[in-house]
Amino acid sequence: MNRAVLLVAASIALLAAAAAAQPRPSDIEGWDQVKWGMTLAQVRELYPGAKPSKNEYWSHLGLPAIRVGEIPLEVSVGARNPSPRVSLISLWCYYGLPAATVGAAPQITAGDFETLKTALFRKYGSPRDELRTTEYGDAVHSYLWVFPSGSITLKLAQGIRTPQLGSFRVEYRAAEKAPI
């Protein structure tokens, strides 16, 4: 019995050491097949079903939704007007809203935020910053990873008076280049 416990403990220690030894990226070039500096037209060639939208400040492409574990996430790629070049990639979902709401994941709760957080910590290591604030009446908990070519922000926004309502957001942002 003691030998079995030692064997299990040694196996867990080896697995933990192997996970810790995984090289962390020293930079991010974008997300999935989307790379910083690509045009929205190039992204649309990669994702033919992408749905365009535009406002005064941004042009966006809505890409097919993805899943991280059981969490469904909407995906949007953005270019700051007037540039057609990708500088923002957002993955997001709302929880606690009716299923008919765009981006809603009624089966998801604030507790599922830990799944996203764990995935990002494993892939990118510890974040540079962790912040707890209030925005628009929501309690916001965010993490920030910074790289030479961009940053990643993971954010949980949760209603202060309605904690069963909120959103998860992962934003990949290209670093701002100084004008030449």
Image (cartoon, rainbow, N blue to C red):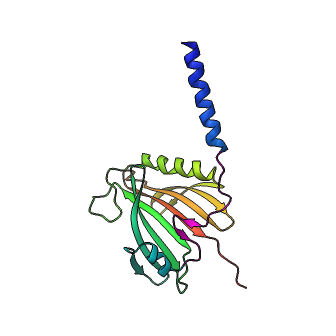
Q: In which quarter of the image is the C terminus?
A: bottom right
Q: Which residue is drawn at 59% across and 28% down?
A: 11
Image quadrant assignment for residue 138:
bottom left
- In the image, is residue 166 part of the stretch drawn in magenta? no
Q: Residue furthest right?
A: 180
* Main SS class of the magenta portion in the image: loop
Q: Which residue lies furthest to the top in this view?
A: 1
Look at the picture and state if 42 lies above or below 34.
below
The percent position of residue 47, horizontal first and vertical second, equals 42, 72
Q: Quadrant of the N terminus?
A: top right
97 lies left or right of 27:
left
Q: Is residue 142 visible?
A: yes
Nearest the viewer among 88 and 34 is 34
Residue range (magenta): 22-38
Q: Which residue is drawn at 55% across and 80% down?
A: 85
Nearest the viewer among 166 and 125 is 125
Please state the total of marks drawn on the protein image: 0
The percent position of residue 94, horizontal first and vertical second, equals 38, 59
66 lies left or right of 80:
left
The percent position of residue 126, horizontal first and vertical second, equals 64, 50
The percent position of residue 140, horizontal first and vertical second, equals 50, 56
Look at the picture and state if 142 lies above or below 174.
above
Q: Which residue is drawn at 54% across and 65% down?
A: 31
Q: Residue at x 31, y 58 (%)?
A: 97
Nearest the viewer among 102 and 22 is 22
102 lies left or right of 83:
left
Q: Can residue 136 be seen in this view?
A: no
20 lies left or right of 161:
right
